[in-house]
Image (tube, grey):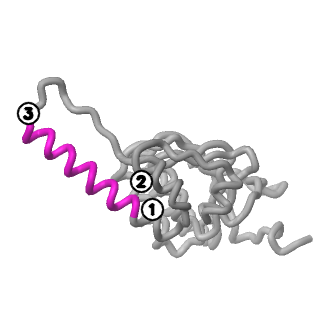
């Protein structure tokens, strides 16, 4: 049996799905508190999310990146938008062959009849969010100039193989909890 497939009693397996929002932040906080109480050293987490709120994703990225628990994250289907930033908090990152990633710039909808000063506030907030997320992307990911150009103005879709080349994932590997391990839903 290879070292990669051996799980210790201090390993645990989780799924995390849904929108990145304050509810997910709360669920993750509670789960990590429980992991700490149980003495978990390594948490294997399958993430399935099409994104959500930038600030909540950044909170989760910072929280998980600085946790004493090692997070090994997996994409078994789709990780998109701010969920990619959440995904990048993993110490080790994997994706199934058929998984995909999508990143894009922030966006918002202004209220009909919004005044110019209100629009300026929205634009400045979007620019700040883009600066925060792009700094994390650049820390972990190496995109080609063509991919950065697409990201500048549109949705950038990455297959699992594209993600491996860019460093989003360490390699192609399925989330496969060993027989006998309890699967926890966050």
Percent x, y for residue 161? 71, 55
Horizontal side of residue 172 vs 139, given as left or right: right
Q: Nearer the viewer, mark 1 or mark 3?
A: 3
Horizontal side of residue 162 vs 151, given as left or right: right
Percent x, y for residue 33? 49, 63
**Residue on which the image places disc 2:** 57
Q: Residue furthest front?
A: 146
Specify the principal SS of the magenta part: helix
- Upstream in sequence: badge 3 or badge 2: 2
**Residue on which the image places disc 3:** 115
Q: Helix or strand or loop: what does disc 1 sit on?
A: helix
Q: Is residue 130 magenta?
A: yes
Residue lying at 56% horizontally and 49% vertically, measured from the top left: 186
Residue lying at 36% horizontally and 50% vertically, measured from the top left: 54
Q: Helix or strand or loop: what does disc 2 sit on?
A: helix
Residue lying at 47% horizontally and 70% vertically, measured from the top left: 139
Residues shaded magenta: 116-134
Give how far apart the Cα atoms at labels 3 and 2 are.
29 Å
Q: Helix or strand or loop: what does disc 3 sit on?
A: loop
Q: Nearer the viewer, mark 3 or mark 2?
A: 3
Q: Residues within 10 Å of mark 2 (few under 14, many from 20)?
A: many
Q: Specify the label residue 61 is tagged with.
A: 1
Asked if the residue under mark 1 is in contact with the one under mark 2, i.e. CB atoms within 8 Å, the reply is yes
Give how far apart the Cα atoms at labels 2 and 1 are.
6 Å
Asked if the residue under mark 2 is in contact with the one under mark 3, i.e. CB atoms within 8 Å, the reply is no
Q: Residues within 10 Å of mark 1 (few under 14, many from 20)?
A: many
Residue lying at 49% horizontally and 50% vertically, measured from the top left: 83
Q: In which image quadrant can residue 36 be found?
A: bottom right
Give how far apart the Cα atoms at labels 1 and 3 are.
34 Å
């Amino acid at each position: 049996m290879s070292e990669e497939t051996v799980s210790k009693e201090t390993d645990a397996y989780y799924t995390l799905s849904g929108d990145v929002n304050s509810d997910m932040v709360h669920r993750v906080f509670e789960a990590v508190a429980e992991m700490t109480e149980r003495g978990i050293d390594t948490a294997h987490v399958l993430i399935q999310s099409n994104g959500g709120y930038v600030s909540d994703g950044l909170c989760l990225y910072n929280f998980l990146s600085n946790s004493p628990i090692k997070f090994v994250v997996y994409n078994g289907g789709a990780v998109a938008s701010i969920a990619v930033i959440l995904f990048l908090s993993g110490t080790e990152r994997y994706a199934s062959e058929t998984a995909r990633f999508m990143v894009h710039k922030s966006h918002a909808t202004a209220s009909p009849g919004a005044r110019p000063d209100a629009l300026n506030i929205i634009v400045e907030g979007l620019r700040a969010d883009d600066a925060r997320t792009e700094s994390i992307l650049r820390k972990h990911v190496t995109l080609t100039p063509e991919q950065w150009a697409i990201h500048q103005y549109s949705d950038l879709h990455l297959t699992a193989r594209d993600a491996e080349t860019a460093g989003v994932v360490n390699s192609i590997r399925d989330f496969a909890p060993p027989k006998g391990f309890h699967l926890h839903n966050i």
